[in-house]
Amino acid sequence: MSASLGTGTRGLVRALAPQLTPASTEAGRIRQLIDNVTSPGSREIWLLFAVLSRTLPTGPDVDNALRGVRHDGLAPFVRELLAVRRKPAQWLVPEIEIIAEPVLLDVHDSASSRLMTGVQRVARSIALEWIERPGVILVGWSTRGTQMLRINTDAFVSRARRGLFARRPIVPWGGHFVLAELVTEPERSARTQAIADSAGVRSAFVANDAIPLTTAETTGAGMPGVFAKYLAAASRFDVAACISQAAAVEYAGWREMLGSAGLTGPQIAVVPLPLAAGNAPAESEAEARALLLTGDLPMVLVVGSHEPRKNHQAVLHAAEVLWREGHEFSLVFIGGNAWNSAEFALRLDELQQAGRPVASHSGLSEPVLWWAYRLAAFSVFPSLNEGFGLPVAESLASGVPAVTSNFGSMREIAQAGGCVLVDPRSDASIAEGMRSLLTDSELRVTLGAQATARIEPGWGRYADELWHLVLD
Amino acid sequence: MSEQETAVAVGALRQRLRAVAPHLTTEVLPDDLGVGALLARLAEDVAGDPSDDRVWLLCTAVAGGYPSQAEVIAVRRGLELASPATAFSAVLAGVARTAAEQREGDVEAVVLVGATLVDVEFCAKHVHNTGIQRVVRSTMPTWQEDHAPRFVAWSNDLTGYRDLSPSQRSLVLEWTSGASLPEDPHEHPPVLVIPWKSTIVIPEVPSALLLERQSAYARFSGNRVGLVGYDAIPIVSADYMVNEESDRFAHYLGLVKNSHVISCISETTGKEFAGFATSLSAQGLAGPSVVVAPLPVALPPKVTETAVATTPRERPLVLMVGSIEPRKNQQAVLSASRLLWAEGLDFEVLIIGGGTAWLVAELDKDIRALQREGRHVSLGRGVSDADLAAAYRDASFVVFPSLQEGYGLPVAEALAKGTPVITTKYGSTAEIAAAGGCLLIDPRDDDDIARAMRDILTDNDLREKLVAEALARPTETWAGYARQLWADFHEVSA
C-alpha cells in the first residue's frame, strides 16, 4: 500500500535501512546511510542520487555513480551529491519526498496544455477514470524536466492552471510508474528512462503509434529525433499498452530491433481505445447547420489536420473527379493547418475559386464538431498511417459511416462494420469508395446501423483493462 | 537568362525528351518535331497510360532531374484532370520545383536500360575513411573488375546522377591510405544519367538532402533499388546520440521503406531492418526484402603495417579501437583495468580512436588522472592505418565491449591478424566471435569485463588457444563479400 516515507535523509534511512530509526541530525542520518548501505545496486544508487541531489538522475548518472562507489566506496559519492546541492540554483528546491509503492500516472502535458490532441485526450481520460483508485498519484515535471511533481487533482479536473503542480518533488520507492503520453523533452526522456531502468518500479506506457519512426517523411522537423529519445526510454519499460493492434505491430517491430543492443524491450499488449460517443447538445444544432451545410447537398466530412500523412489532397482530387462526373455533394474539412499543409491550402483555394462546394474550418467547439459528424452523409479518412484513427471512431460513434484506409488501425476499427475500405495511395480507389456511398443510400443506411451498434458509453472499460494490465 | 542561354536550355530539353521518347511511346516521332509539340505528344501519351514509372520518366526528362514523390503525384493528378490540349502544362506545373532547383539548364540526358548504377556520392568526393567508406572502398574494386557497373554521384545541385570524373573514380576504386582530395572533387561530366528498368545500388547511407529524390525513384521509377544496411544505432541507442543523428536516420528509413532489397552487414542488423519492415504492415506496406551478407573477417586490402619494434614490450598491451563515445564503452574498460591494476596485474592499455572534441577531452582527463597514479594507459589519436595494423599485431588482445554495433570492424581486423578479442556477448560481435578467437562479456558489467581480461593476462595457455582459434578461422575476403553483395542485388528477383 502506498505510503510516504518522509523527506530527505530521513526518508532515505527508512527506505534503505528500514531496520534503523532515523537519527535526529542530518549528519547522523548520513552516517547511518554510509554505514548500512553496503554494496548498493542501481536501484539504491538511483534513490540516493535523486534524494540527495534533489534531481532525478539520468542513466549515465547512475552508471558513473555505480562505478565511483565500486572503486572508492559510498562516502565520496554522498559527499559529491551534497556538494551539488550547495550550488545556488539548487537552494530553492525543497527536500524530496519518498513515496513507497505508489501508482504514479504521468500526465504532464495533458494537465498543463490547452491543446487537446488525440494523445492528450487519451491521457486525460485515463486520469479522470483512475483519479480515485488506491495509490494513484498524478504527476508532472518541473520546468527543467529534472524533478517529478505531484499534480493537484482538483486543479486537474477543473483544468485550472494555478496550483496545478505541488512544489515538493516526489520519488517512488517501489510501486508503479505509468506514462500516459508522449515525452518530447529530452531531459524528461532521459530521466524517465532511468526511472524505468533503475528505480525498481513496474513501468508501463500507453503506446499510441510509432509514426515519427515508421513514417518520418510525414512529420515535422526534429520530431523523429526527440521521438527516438522517447523510444530509448520506452525500451526500458516493462509493458507497452498499445491503443490498437496496428500500434502493437509497430511496437513489436521496434522491439525486434532492440536485441542488437542486448535489450529485451517491453511486453507488447493491446488495450484498444473505446468508440466513445461525444456530446452533441441540441442548442448547438442550428449553429452547426448554418456553418457546415450547403443547401440540401449531402455533406461529406473530413476531420483532421492538413498534414500530408492525412492525405487530404487525395480527397480533394477524388472529390473533383466526382464533381466532374456530376455527383452533387458538399465537402467539409475540419482541422487546422499543420506541417507542410501549404499545398493543400492552395488546391482548396483553386477549387473554391472554381465554385466547388468545399470549405475548411478549424478551431470549432466540441459540440459543433460532434454535430458535424451527425450532419454528415458520411466521413472520409484515408490516412497513410494512424495509431488509432480517432475521426473514424468518432464518426462511427455518431452513427455515421466512414470511408477509410484498408490497412492498419483503420481497417481494425472497420472490421466490426460501418466502413467502406479503400486504398489511400490510389485516388481512384478513394473516389470509388466515396462514389458508392453517394449513389447507394441503402448502403449508407446499412453501414450507419452497423456503426450505431458499436457505441460505448465512455472510457470505463478502457481504463479498467489498462489498470489490470499494469497492476495485476 | 539571355536569349542564347534560353536557346541552349530549350535545345537540351528537346534532347532529353527525345532520349526518353522511345521508352514512352511506340510510335516513331518525326525528327523535325519542335520542343513544344514533342512535349505535348509525350504528355498526351503518358496521360493515356499514367503508370507511375512512365510519369516519373517524363518528369525527369522535363525537369532535367529526378522528381520528388509529391511531384510525381501532382503530375499524375494533373494529367488525370487535363484535356489532351492541356496535358503538357500539367507536367510543367507539376515539376516546377525540381526544374527550378536544377541549375544546369543545358543538361542533356542519357537513358540507361537494364544497367546497374552504383551511387557512391560520398566516397567519390571525400577522403574520410572509416566504417562505411572502408566497406565501399574495399568492395567496389571487385565489382568494377567483375561487372564494370556505372558508378555515379549527384550533380552539385543534387537533382540527378552524373558519371564520375577520373579523379572521383580513383577515390572510390583506387583508394590508398592517406590519399588527398583532388583540386576540384565536385567537377563531373555534364550529362544526366537516367536509369530505366535498371538496378540502383546505394552502398552508403546517403545525406538527408538526397533522400527525397531517392525515395521517389525507389517508389515510382520502376528501377530496382538495393541498399546496404549497416545498423539502426541512431534509433536503438538513441540515448547515446544527438537528436539530429536519429532524425536523419528516421528519414533514411523513408528510403528503406520504398526500396526493394537491403543487404545487411550482420544477422543482427538484418533483425533490425526486418523488425522495421514488420512494423510497416501497419501502414499497408511490405518494405524491402531483407537479406544478410556478413562482412568478411579480413584486413582492408593494401595496408602495409609498421615494422616490429626491435625491443620487446615491457608489459602486455591491451588494445581498444573505436570512436571515442559512450556507446563504445571506453569507461568500462578503464574501470575494469583499475580493478585489475589494484589486484597487482601489470599491463598497458592503449585506446585508439577519435571523436567529438568534448568527449575526447573528457576521456583524456580520466586517462591523465590514471597516469598520475602511475598506470600505463594512453590515448592514440590520428593513428595511421600502418600503425593501427601494427598495434593489432602487437597487442596481447583487443577489448571491444561496445553496447551496440552493426558489425564491429575492430573485432574482425584483430582476428584477421590472429589477435584474441574480448567483446560483447550479444549482437553482431557475438556473431563474429562464434567462429573462434574471442571471449564474450556483458558490456554493462565491469566485473565481467575484468574477469575476461584477467583470464587472458594470467593464463598464457588460454591466450595461445585463442590465438590458434583466430588463426584457424575460415579465410574470408573482401572480394568474396563483394560477390555475395552483388548477388543479393541481382538474384533475388526470381
Image (tube, helix red, strand yellow):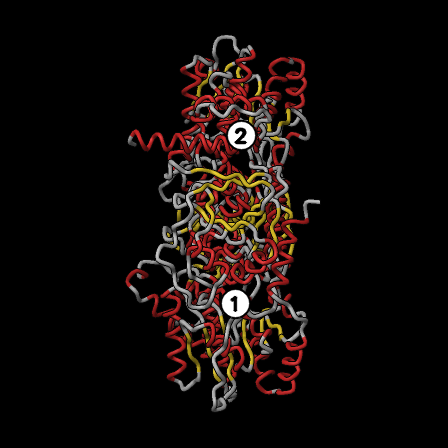
Which callout, 2 or 1, points to the residue nearer the camera? 2
Which residue: 51% across, 50% down? B119
Q: Is residue B237 left or right of residue A77?
A: right
Which percent across, then down, holds residue B159?
Answer: 43, 41
Q: Is residue B456 visible?
A: yes
Reading the image, the residue beneath label 2 is: B21
Q: Is residue B55 left or right of residue A52?
A: right
The quadrant in which the N terminus of chain B is found is: top left
Element type at marker 2?
helix
**Pointer 1 chain:** A
Q: Is residue A460 left or right of residue B191?
A: right
Using the image, tell me which numbered label, if any, was put on residue B304: none
Q: Is residue A457 visible?
A: no
Which percent across, then down, holds residue A143?
Answer: 36, 50
Amino acid residing under circle 1: Ser
Amino acid residing under circle 2: Ala
Which residue: 58% across, 20% down? A378
Reading the image, the residue beneath label 1 is: A42
